[in-house]
Amino acid sequence: KQEVTQIPAALSVPEGENLVLNCSFTDSAIYNLQWFRQDPGKGLTSLLLIQSSQREQTSGRLNASLDKSSGRSTLYIAASQPGDSATYLCAVSLDSGGGADGLTFGKGTHLIIQP
Amino acid sequence: NAGVMQNPRHLVRRRGQEARLRCSPMKGHSHVYWYRQLPEEGLKFMVYLQKENIIDESGMPKERFSAEFPKEGPSILRIQQVVRGDSAAYFCASSPAGYSYNEQFFGPGTRLTVL
């Protein structure tokens, strides 16, 4: 059974710092990995998707890496801003051959950027 | 292109009543997924549907819960005889057909409160 763990569970840093969020998964047979952000009481916003054959993806100040063999991904946020405050979720899709499985989520990292 | 729509956004039911949650996928998307987020828990996959077919319901409780995605109209998640433990946020996601790397786009969720 796939398990996804995110470390740290919570993080509070001053504005402007670069930071790294970690995600690990137990079954390396993944189809892809997605990073989301969730604001309080709201839905999920997709940030980055990394296909199993890729090593990293970038979008603006965000960079996500994937080491499939070791079961790890990191989300790097550069020059953090108060608007980045949210819960960040990592999710993996298993490769069952159909390419369209449900996602297994970590419990998230609750990030606070202090102005 | 409107995003994934869910309604109602908030639903209050008394124990024993039925709850019906609706999800309209993004235009052009034919895959729908339902997830549940219990208080202080991560998101858990419930069911994956395509038009008129349930593909994977491995995360769905065996009793009282059912889902459908008819040829016309939204996907419906139905919870019969609700209990307090059903109180949660229910999220719907959709993705395009085919081998699209299964990027899932989430709706804003329906927050169910059972009194």
Image (cartoon, coloured by chain):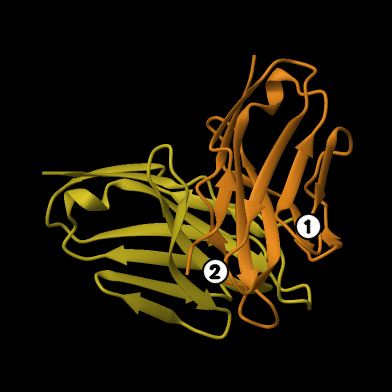
Chain letter for the orange part: B
**Looking at the image, do the residues carrying marks 1 and 2 touch, with CB atoms under 8 Å apart?**
no
Residue bearing the label numbered 1? B69
From the image, tell me which residue sits under label 2: A33
Q: Nearer the viewer, residue B19 or A34?
A: B19
Above or below for A105 versus A33: above
Q: For the residue marked with disc 2, what is the amino acid?
A: Leu
What amino acid is at disc 1? Answer: Phe
Residue A17 x/y as whole percent:
15, 57
Q: Dividing the image into 4 quarters, which one contains the N terminus of chain A? A: bottom right
Residue ID at (42%, 74%):
A65
Residue count near mark 1 (Cα–Cα under 10 Å), binned few <14, some 14–19, many ≥20: many
Kind of element beneath mark 2: strand
Q: Is residue B21 left or right of residue A42?
A: right
Q: Is residue B75 left or right of residue A60?
A: right
Can you say whether B55 is above or below A97 in the image? above
Chain A, colour shown: yellow
Residue A70 rendering spot, x and y as whole percentages: 55, 71
Specify the subunit that label 1 lies on: B
Q: Residue at x 58, y 79 (%)?
A: A52
Question: So how many labels did they put on this image?
Answer: 2
Q: Is residue B64 above or below residue B57?
A: above
Q: Secondary structure at mark 1?
A: loop
A10 relative to B56 in the view: left or right = left
